[in-house]
Amino acid sequence: MAATDVSEREARQVAEDARESEWNLPSFGKQLFLGHLQLDLIHPQPRLDPARVEEGEAFLKDLRTFLSEHVDPLLIERDARIPDEVIEGLKRLGALGMKVPKQYGGLGLSQVYYNRALTLVGSVHSSLGALLSAHQSIGVAEPLLHFGSEEQKQEWLPKVATDHISAFLLTEPDVGSDPARVGTTAEPTPDGKGYVLNGTKLWATNGAIADIVVVMAKVPKSDGHRGGISAFVLDYNTDGVSVAHRNQFMGLRGIENSVTLLKDVHVPAENLIGKEGQGLKIALTTLNTGRLALPAICLGTTKAATKYAREWAAERVQWGQPVGKHDAVAQKIAFIAASSFGLEAMLDVASRMADDKQRDIRIEAAIGKLYGSEIGWKVVDELIQIRGGRGYETAESLKARGERPVPAEMMLRDMRINRIFEGSTEIMHLLIAREAVDQHLAVAGDILEPEVALGDKAKAAVGAAQFYAKWLPQLAVGEGMKPGSFGEFDALGTHLRYVERASRKMARSTFYAMGRWQAKLERKQTVLGRIVDIGAELFAISSAVVYADTIRREQPGRAEEAFALADLFCKQARRRADALFGDLFDNDDDAAYAVAQDVLAGKFTWDEEGILDLSGDGPAVAS
């Protein structure tokens, strides 16, 4: 594939431009990384609009009925595809248009109810969640709603809201998490009426069955064309579009994921979304907005895991009592239940924030994706352990010998992808870390000289010293700040006091890392990852307390139980955060990195002796 001429600096500038309109909007996560627990940004949670609640509940009722009566997850696993009649049924329900505004033919559900629908769907089969979220969270609708012209919205949104499945074609065989290197080209036609697309797109979810897609391609610079990576809406039936391969994976066996070839594909000029060169901005904005779908799907799995663990551990008897009475198993059940509550709290807080268009939720959505995929994986792994051999056995096999077909091993296989797609854990660490560190640089801007921001090491040292002298005292035990009492949260208030202290400690640690490594900090990815994980735990703790309080107000009959789950979750999250603090600057990162480079250099090939590799000598990455 041809490389683009977009540099790292240009790509970063595009990212800055993509968030510029949101920069001055209030952000709880942004303040948390700066050492400020600004609780008023998430508490009290805004009450849900009664009219939208009624609409949302009515849709969930119909969706639940449809899923229970017409979807067989074992059939999806057996055939490795979602039956046509299921997809047609989802279309009739309006499930393809949950997020599309009513004026364009959609249901216009709130983010809260869209996520609740994905949670419900995800509890049945993750491939259904992938179908609907790829279609709506990152498919044609989302880019058009943010950047499309009114003419484009009128033409395309009614289609994707009803019966046209959409996909997002970004990734390429040699381009994964680095979209600035997109090699697919879009050559303007001589008459100026369109573009000709050529390239290969990999891992396009819904790409094997799509009707309409968004394609990212590079327009070359020329007279009358600013060029750059651009976004196009494309009818998938256009000549030159072909699906070369339907990809198959360890999990998500019903997913329609493709390798799509674009050979001299003509796309009209009016199908350009936004302007030439805005493709990265559109891609980044779309992914930022769509990331809340993934923790919603993960939540469906963790809720199901809680139910399956409870029922099995209460019924299965070993050594004279149910296995749930044995401490080793009880600890796992408590972790699963508390973690599911914590994830639901984060999702509810972020979703209500998303419905408030005056809020910046980039950090919260990114943390939700990161946290949901990581905690979800641990939850399902523990479910497998609780069920033992029956956790490892397929649901089909369990059913064949007369037992309840609990799909625990399927859940494990399906959950694993969440740590990879829509931004791997490692990429999410870097994305959130860049946001966090940039916040500190912005605060330091009135102290550090302009040359410092450009990387002058000598002046950076002086500037950093001045910076610490001014700001670190304020981030100590509480000098210059009035600590919160949080008495209204009763016993949960102690967890918010922990967040208040720990957020200042996290900010101090970030400042210290900036001074210690300066420009090299960007390469200390494991350190940055720990800082991000600390921030994620602090956001999770805050969300759990706030959500428990919301339940007390909105569902008082569940208040006591909600507080118990929140308390346990917060205690577990605090232990994880404390461990991360301990590892932040006392670790074996440098030794491990050195050994890894030696491995790559071939120094330890003797360690690979005694095996047989039958995969052959083909390319690791196809060209």
Image: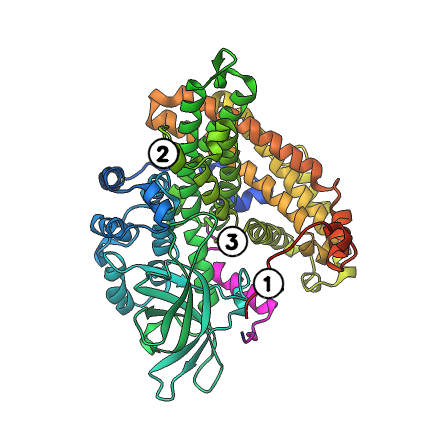
Q: Quadrant of the C terminus?
A: bottom right
- Mark 3 or mark 2, which is nearer to you? 2
Image quarter for residue 349? top left
Q: Amino acid at mark 3?
A: Gly
Residue wearing tag 2 = 400
x, y percent for residue 243: 38, 67
Q: x and y percent of residue 325 in the render?
A: 50, 15
Report if residue 45 lies within the magenta region: no
Label 2, label 1: how far apart the Cα atoms are: 39 Å
Give the extent of the magenta segment: 2-25
Q: Quadrant of the N terminus?
A: bottom right
User: Is residue 573 placed above or below 7 in the rendered structure?
Assistant: above
Q: Secondary structure at mark 1?
A: loop
Query: Which of the labelled discs sits on residue 423, or is there none?
Result: 3
The residue at which mark 1 appears reads as 620
Category of crowding for the residue at label 3, using alpha-carbon neighbours closer than 10 angstroms: few (below 14), some (14–19), many (at least 20): some
Q: Residue at x 37, y 30 (%)?
A: 401
As drawn, which residue projects farthest toward the bottom? 190
| Residue 479 visible within the image | no
Asked whether the residues under the numbered discs 3 and 1 touch, taking CB atoms below 8 Å apart as contact, a structural biologist would say: no
Residues under numbered marks 3 and 2 in contact, where contact means CB atoms less than 8 Å apart: no
Task: Look at the image and say whether residue 22 sits in the magenta stretch.
Answer: yes
Who comes first in sequence, dot 3 or dot 2? Answer: 2
**Amino acid type for the residue under numbered disc 2:** Ala
What's under tag 1, amino acid-wise?
Ala
Q: In 3D space, how far apart are the residues under numbered discs 3 and 1 (Cα atoms)?
A: 21 Å
